[in-house]
Amino acid sequence: MILALAIVSVLLALLPAVLAAVNLSVLRTPVSDASRTEASRRQHGSPHLAGEGQGEVCDTSDKLAHLTPTLSFQEREPVVLYADRSSMADPGRPDAEKTPRVSILIPARDEAATIEHTVRAALASTGATVEVLVGDDHSTDATAALVRAIAATDPRVRLVAIPSLPEGWTGKNHACSVLAGAARFPHLLFIDADVTLAAAAAAALAAHATATGAALVSGVPRQRMGTLGERLTVPMIGFLLVGYLPVPMMRSSLRPSLGAACGQLVLVDRAVYAQTGGHGAIRGFLHDGVLLARLFRAAGHGTDLVAGHALATCRMYRGWTEAWAGFSKNAHEGMATPRALPVWTALLFTAHILPVLLLILFGLGLAAPGAAGLALVALLLSLGTRAAITFAMREPALTIPLHPVAVAVALLIQWNVLLRRKAAGAAVWKGRSYPLNGA
């Protein structure tokens, strides 16, 4: 019995290992024709792009593989994204934009601690014409005052007062819908109030959308984590996305079930957003990123994921309590369903937790060496996959040995939400309570 469990553990640990290898390879996009054109220009003495660090001029020819729209997992620290302005649009296309126009939309509710930094980073965007709209959703702190002060010195900034929350809407969806209605540019870039954009992020995302024809482009920002509670929860976002979503299949199909996005960083085509209903079509839900991608796909529009670590950074939560509450909120519309959670539990527990338990049994003399050897193989596959994803997404290396515990915490959150759904009755976030289906 133990030997059979060890064999299954190896097989299930192989699944994310193979998918991660394929996905990381696919996201490492080959050099585009526009990039090769830029390289040719450089060889003929064209000026260099601005360099790293303090803005010095440097030769970036060794980084041409990372010019947009080739958004790669291979950038080195410090994170700098180079915008290839020649690839912003094909001049032969009727819808070509020489300089993309992007409305950066930031819903904010009691975000005084981060909003000024977020807005100023957005205003520092290069390679695109931007406007920055901040939706003040009835904040009780200095959020509105801070944005108003910036707007007084930069006409690209507008503070939008979000009306009272209508019945049947969740707060973020309502704020995003209002902001989209006030935006003026053809690309809408939704970011959370704790996301810091890289200077070339807006231009890069718009260029990628234009080059691929995707109506929605999203990526997971590089996650900053300051506490153990964050390190035990946040890394599972990237691990599940890269380790369990078949990206090549997602790109070759419009099946809504393959739609995926990170709500922290989502660029959409304004016309398609209006046509599909945008956030208004998912008004009563909490998981806007995934549901927007599925909405677009159901209407026949392509969506795409890119490597987001060089586009933006984000610190989602500050401590265990916030992380538990935040991931519990999202669990209501994620794994925590009677049909999905048992399947996910079998996949994750068997591949990432069971190997540790089998090795403990071997140490206690309760498992044979053969089973222990297979368990060790499964554990190395699990940790190796986690390491590859961690390094690719520039997350803290210290989270790698915590991986089995992180998987256990993720499952604990999901099961707690599922089993206590009726007792809880609502998901609570930012001082608002949202009734749950079936509660």
Image: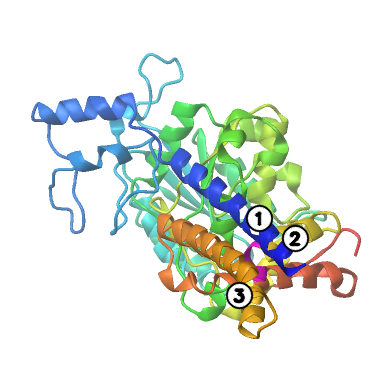
Q: Which residue occupies 73% across, 44% down?
A: 280
Q: Which dot marks residue 346?
A: 2
Q: Whole-percent x and y of residue 51?
A: 18, 49
Location of mark 3 (residue):
405
Secondary structure mostly seen in the magenta stretch? helix
Residue 102 as seen in the image, left or right of residue 163: left
Q: Whole-percent x and y of residue 99?
A: 35, 31
Q: Which residue occupies 59% across, 43% down?
A: 180
**Foreground disc of the pair 3, 1:** 1
Q: Is residue 62 above or below residue 173?
A: above
Q: Is residue 167 magenta?
A: no
**Foreground disc of the pair 3, 2:** 2
Q: Return the disc, 2 or 1, that comes first in the chain's sequence.
A: 1
Q: Amino acid at mark 3?
A: Val
Q: Whole-percent x and y of residue 387?
A: 46, 62
Q: Is residue 352 magenta?
A: yes
Stretch in magenta: 351-356
Q: Residue placed farthest to the front in the image?
A: 369
Q: Which dot marks residue 160?
A: none
Q: Amino acid at mark 1?
A: Leu
Q: What's the CA distance linking mark 2 and mark 1?
A: 9 Å
Q: Which residue occupies 84% across, 62% down?
A: 436
Location of mark 1 (residue):
12
> Under tag 2, what secondary structure?
helix
Q: Return the disc, 3 or 1, that comes first in the chain's sequence.
A: 1
Q: Return the disc, 3 or 2, that comes first in the chain's sequence.
A: 2
